Image (cartoon, rainbow, N blue to C red):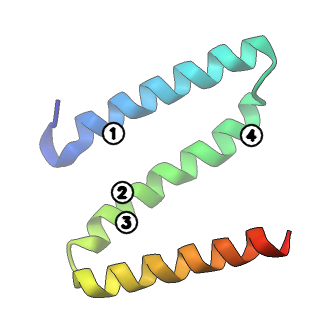
Amino acid sequence: LQGHGGHLVLFEQLRHAAAGAALQGAYGNVNVRDAVLVGVPSVAGVIAGAALQQHVAQRKLSLAFSIVLLALAGELVVK
């Protein structure tokens, strides 16, 4: 399924996410507007992150991801 630069895979994931959000929105389980507000910018984040990881050392990426996970864990503990 992988096309040029993984675009086909990203498209398929978007298609499935949109279908799921629409279906669950019809059931009243998901606010479709909120799903769009979260989903659309996340696509830009995925594309930017994929491009960035090609130019950053793996050790730095692992360290940055560890910091993000620790921050999220700390937020969960505080709540």
Q: Give percent across and percent down for residue 64.
A: 44, 83
Question: Is residue 56 among the parts visible in the rendering?
Answer: no
**N-term mark: 4 or 3:** 4
Disc 3 designates what residue? 49
Asked whether, in this view, residue 21 is left or right of residue 60, the answer is right
Disc 1 designates what residue? 10
CA–CA distance in space, label 4 to label 3: 22 Å
Asked whether, in this view, residue 30 is left or right of residue 53, the answer is right
Kind of element beneath mark 4: helix
What amino acid does circle 4 point to?
Asp
Q: Quadrant of the N terminus?
A: top left
Residue found at x 64% / y 14%:
23
CA–CA distance in space, label 1 to label 4: 20 Å
CA–CA distance in space, label 1 to label 2: 9 Å
Vertical side of 5 occupied by 32: above or below: above
Q: Do the residues bearing badges 4 and 2 touch, measured as CB atoms within 8 Å?
A: no
Asked whether, in this view, residue 4 is left or right of residue 55, the answer is left
Disc 2 designates what residue? 47
**N-term mark: 1 or 4:** 1
What amino acid does circle 3 point to?
Gly
Disc 4 designates what residue? 34
Kind of element beneath mark 3: helix
Crowdedness near tag 1: few (<14), some (14–19) or many (≥20) residues, C-alpha within 10 Å: some
